[in-house]
Structures are given as C-alpha cells and as structure tokens.
Image (cartoon, helix red, strand yellow):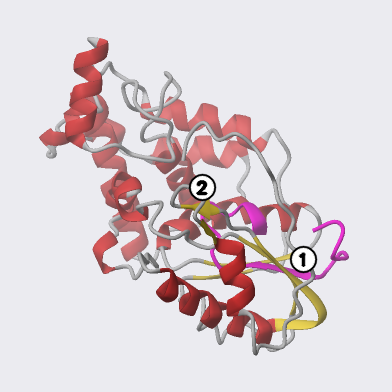
Amino acid sequence: IDRLTDHGDVVYDPFMGRGTTPIEAALSGRVPYGNDTNPLSRALTEPRLNPPSYEDVVARLKLVPWSSFVSHENDSLLAFYHPHTLAQIEGLREWLVSREKSGEMDQIDRWIRMVAINRLTGHSSGFFSVYTLPPNQAVTVERQLKINEKRAQVPTIRDVSAIIAKKSKNLLSQGTVAACRSLLLTSQSENTPEISDGSVALTVTSPPFLDIVNYESDNWLRCWFLDIDPKAIKIAQYRKVEDWERFIKATLGELSRVTRQGGHIAFEVGEVRNKSIRLEEHVIKAAEGLPIQTLGVMINQQEFTKT
C-alpha cells in the first residue's frame, strides 16, 4: 500500500475476509474498498472503519437488558459455554438481530456485534467459551466435547458484557481510523458494478484456495450469532484446478475493469496438494488475454506449522 499508492487512492480487496486490506488502507490515508460474498466479512470490517468511542460502547452495553437473559435454548452449545453465559450470548444475539431488523442498529451496535463474534470461542479467559481452538476456526460440538474430556474441563461463567467492554477498550486505545469514504460490498468477485471503471489504484487480495479451507464449517458459530444461513451463501470452493482457474479469470476480468491505468494487483496464493500445484502459475494463466501485464512472482518460503 505504501509503495504502490498515494494518499487518497482507492485500495481494494475482492475477498476481504476479516478486512485486513481495507482497514490497513484506511489507516494509511487511502480510500478502502472491500468485498466478500459472506456477510460475516462486512460485519467484521465495517465497525473498524467507523468506530465509536469507548464511552459510547460502555453506555450502550448498559442498555442491553442483561438481567432478562436468564435461560438458554440451544443445549448443544453447552459444550462451549456455561448455562449462564450461554443465556447472555443468546440474549445479546436476539437483541442485536431485532435492532437490525427494525432499522435501529447503528455504529455502536455494529461495534459490539463485531467484538462479540470475535470473542465467541478462544483459548483464554478473554473469550466467552471454555478452552478451545483460536477464534478463527470454530470446532464442531462433537470435537469440543472431546477437547473437554481430554482436558477434564467444564465451561465456567464468563461476564459477556465485561469481556466486550475490556476488548473494546484495548482495540480503541490502539488508534482508530479517521472518518473516511469507503465502499464495502457483499457480492460475487466477478460482478461488482458499484465500483466505477478505472477507479482502483491497487488491489491486495488472497482468493479462496483450492479445496483447502472450509469457510462454512469454520464460521458456523459466527454465522449463527449473526443469524446468517451459511448454506445460502455462494462461497467459492473448487476441487478441480480448471474450475478454480476459470473463477480466477472471471475475477481478474472484473479487476482489469476497475483498475486504473498504471494500477496494480497483488494476488497472494500458495502451493496445495503437497506442493504439486502452484496456484500462482494458474493465476498467470488465467490473466492471459486480459489487459494485465504480469510483473513477476515473489515467493515467501517458510515452514508452516498449521494450515
């Protein structure tokens, strides 16, 4: 971003995920554009581009009717949460969903929701759950029951409101994005008519890899909290490299439309299937016939400890 753009330039990510690219772009004084077919991405990113004050968060948390959240409905989630904690989570979920449906949801509510979905599961007392995997991958109920048995652990009471307030104070004390123009979409990467021709200076992105990550299963708990049906979301997952390459070509075709003359596209991919497939080779092949010049491939060689 610093090397290839100037202040006020548009920086875009068509697969924004947790929003790293648009947030970093905004922090650098660029105009953040982002897209992801999963509405979860927008819920994670939008509040960081328009953050409330810590005082506003605390005041809003006091308005949540915590004392009325005394019973839970979803017994299966007791694998992760103490019954009292689960009642608080379900109550907050329903409160936020109702505010969104009624049109009352504002930037403070979106911030609280963003922090909550990042605190649903984790490996310390700073999360709502008992010890489990780090928050970017929610294990199944069955897997969590096995973790509980192996560790001889039971979920303990967590103060949902206090955890949200503490994490908010930490995040907001790190410095926030100044109010800026932004565009966040929930579309297919090859069809973004909201973005004008030649308006993007730089795209920095990492597309879904070839049959490596199951985004639906990893995010099932977050989608539940957001009242999203992950099966209704058209998330790109391909097993055949030919199909993946066609998907990338369609995306690059759209990027060639929105990228300005002299702009750049940084496409981060990797090796899959025991290094037998180098995805960058298929990205280059997908760019053939498009008004894109391949400048080169930069290889980051490292030892991976996890997928």
Horizontal relation, residue 60 to residue 211: left or right: right
Secondary structure character of the magenta stretch overall: loop
Question: In the depicted view, which residue is nearer to us: 169 or 76?
Answer: 76
> Which residue is painted at 45% across and 39% down in the image?
118
Q: Let me know if residue 54 appears in the view.
A: yes
In the rendered view, would you say 264 is above or below 212? below
Name the secondary structure under disc 2. helix
Name the secondary structure under disc 1. loop
Question: In the depicted view, which residue is nearer to us: 154 or 269?
Answer: 269
Q: Identify which amino acid the numbered label 2 is placed on.
A: Trp
Reading the image, the residue beneath label 1 is: 296
Residue 78 within the magenta-colored segment of the rendering:
no
Q: Which residues are magenta?
A: 1-22
For marks 1 and 2, give the CA distance. Answer: 39 Å
> Which residue is painted at 58% across and 59% down in the image?
206
The image quadrant of residue 175 is top right
> Which residue is painted at 23% across and 28% down in the image?
144
Reading the image, the residue beneath label 2 is: 111
**Spot occupied by residue 242 in the image (x, y as percentages of width and height):** 43, 75
Q: Give the number of the mark in front: 1 or 2.
A: 1
Q: Let me know if residue 178 appears in the view.
A: no
